[in-house]
Image (cartoon, helix red, strand yellow):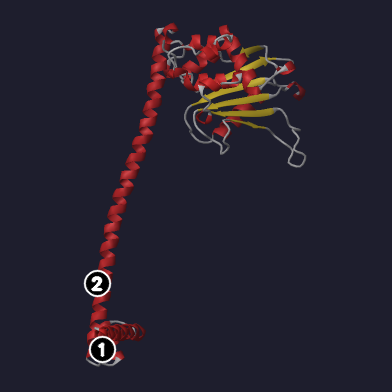
Amino acid sequence: MKFADPKNDIAFKKIFGDENHKEVLISFLNAVLDFQGEQTIIDVELANPYQVPKIEALKETILDIKATNQKQEHFIVEMQKKDLGDFTKRSLYYTAKAYVNQLDAGKNYHKLKKVYFIGLLNFTMFESGSCISRHLILNQETNTQDLDDFEFCFIELPKFSTPLGELNTLLDKWLYFIKNAASLEMVPKEFTGNSALEQAFDSAQMYNWNREEMDVYDYMHLKAWDEVNAIDTAVKKAKKQGIEQGIEQGIEQGIEQGIAQGIEQEKIETAINAIKQGLDNQVISVIAGLSPEEIEIHIWKRMCLTTIIFLLQMKS
């Protein structure tokens, strides 16, 4: 038994965006947002329900959802596999767009409903150790949520590490399914007895898929690997180029430093020989190309060295 990877674009939409199996998405949303009582979602209307896409028309994996509860709220769900940067701005953009699109020209603002953004990320984005972070607009002074029409929930899958035997909540099971389904060979007993989870596994079973779905799935899988390999290759080339440039610069700097040290040593030797001959410092300065101060330093160093050698000889 082979299960598709729910993180794959077409697999995610097939599992969570199928209008014939709305209970899967309803269960997932209620678990993620911890909806209970009057907040509980009982039905969903998908603005972009699952259809087998043409490869040339593939777009990002986003579910635009109008959910039915007592508040008639709106939800955006996005599965993002790669960190392309600025994902927080992207989430703000889609949330604001969904909010604005609710209102036709001439209608009153009070008809606008709250929008939730749920981002499933296959990478880490925040410093927090928790795999789930919720973001609200709060009053800085009172810490109250006076502007409550936007709410963001980010799920960082790499931070979810709960083992199969310790899945205590429905949310734990959904996250385990999304992260690990592709590596499972059968439906774990921990998932039996819940119709939504069982349906999710059934939708993920690839022997139920048609040829067109398989082709798109394989294309997206290979595309993801190609992107990873392209990044790795670019990094390796950059490292190699950096090392080569570093070696070349190091050689050039070494040569320059060696030449400079050789010239300096030659000046010092010339000055020392002139000192031995008892020449005046001004004369030595001209001959050796050293300042009178530098000559004094070398004379002092030589005197110290001569004294040390003399003392050592006396001891022996």
Residue 65 in the image: x percent, y percent? 62, 17
123 to 53, vertically: above or below: below
Q: Where residue 80 is drawn, which disc sits there?
A: none
Hey, which quadrant is residue 2 in on the image?
top left
**Type of residue at label 1?**
Ile
Numbered disc 2: secondary structure? helix
* Residue drawn at x 42%, y 14% as measured from the top left: 185
Of callouts 1 and 2, the N-terminal one: 2
Q: Answer yes or no: is residue 17 visible.
A: no
Quadrant in the picture for the C terminus: bottom left
Judging by the rendered image, the residue that carries numbered circle 2 is: 262
Numbered disc 1: secondary structure? helix
Quadrant in the picture for the N terminus: top left
* Residue drawn at x 23%, y 77% as measured from the top left: 266
In this rendered view, identify the residue nearer to me: 314 or 210. Answer: 314
Judging by the rendered image, the residue that carries numbered circle 1 is: 275
Horizontal side of residue 82 vs 140, given as left or right: left
Horizontal side of residue 157 vs 313, given as left or right: right
